[in-house]
Image (cartoon, grey):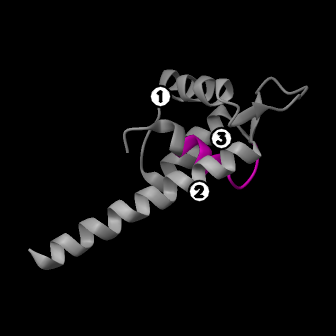
Amino acid sequence: MSDPTILVLSSLADGEKHGYAIMADVEAFAGVRLGPGTLYGAITRLEERGLIRPRQSDDRRQPYRITAAGRQYLRDELASLDQVVRTGQRRLREA
């Protein structure tokens, strides 16, 4: 998976998390290890697009949550990926 923003959105789909929790979650469900620079670059891009937002917290670690726009974007991207998977599987069967 070349776009870490989809991985971050997928992680936040089930609730708010801080950066290290997102990194651990992505590694658990996708087997991908995101470095801190990659993670925070993705978080910055997602915030700028209004797909996630930080939640105010007294904790040192900043939690993030997905927005309604972020949920819709993730649904659309996953539907697109599903189409790619179905097409790839069909072509493999036909080969």
Residue 89 sits above or below residue 50 on the image: below
Residue wearing tag 2:
75
Residue 57 placed where, x, y %?
88, 29
Residue at the spot of label 3: 21
Residue range in magenta is: 7-16
Distance from Cα at disc 3 to Cα at disc 1:
13 Å
Q: Which residue is mark 1?
A: 35
Q: Which residue appears at 37% of the width and 39% of the height?
A: 2
Quadrant hosting residue 83? bottom left
Is the C-beta separation of discs 1 and 2 under 8 Å?
no
Task: Residue 17: give x, y in percent of width and height.
Answer: 72, 41
- Mark found first going from the N terminus, 3 or 1: 3
* Type of amino acid at the residue the image marks with label 3: Ala
Report how far apart the C-alphas of labels 1 and 2 lie in the structure.
25 Å
The magenta stretch spans residue 83: no
At label 2, which amino acid type do we have? Arg
**94 displayed left or right of 38:** left
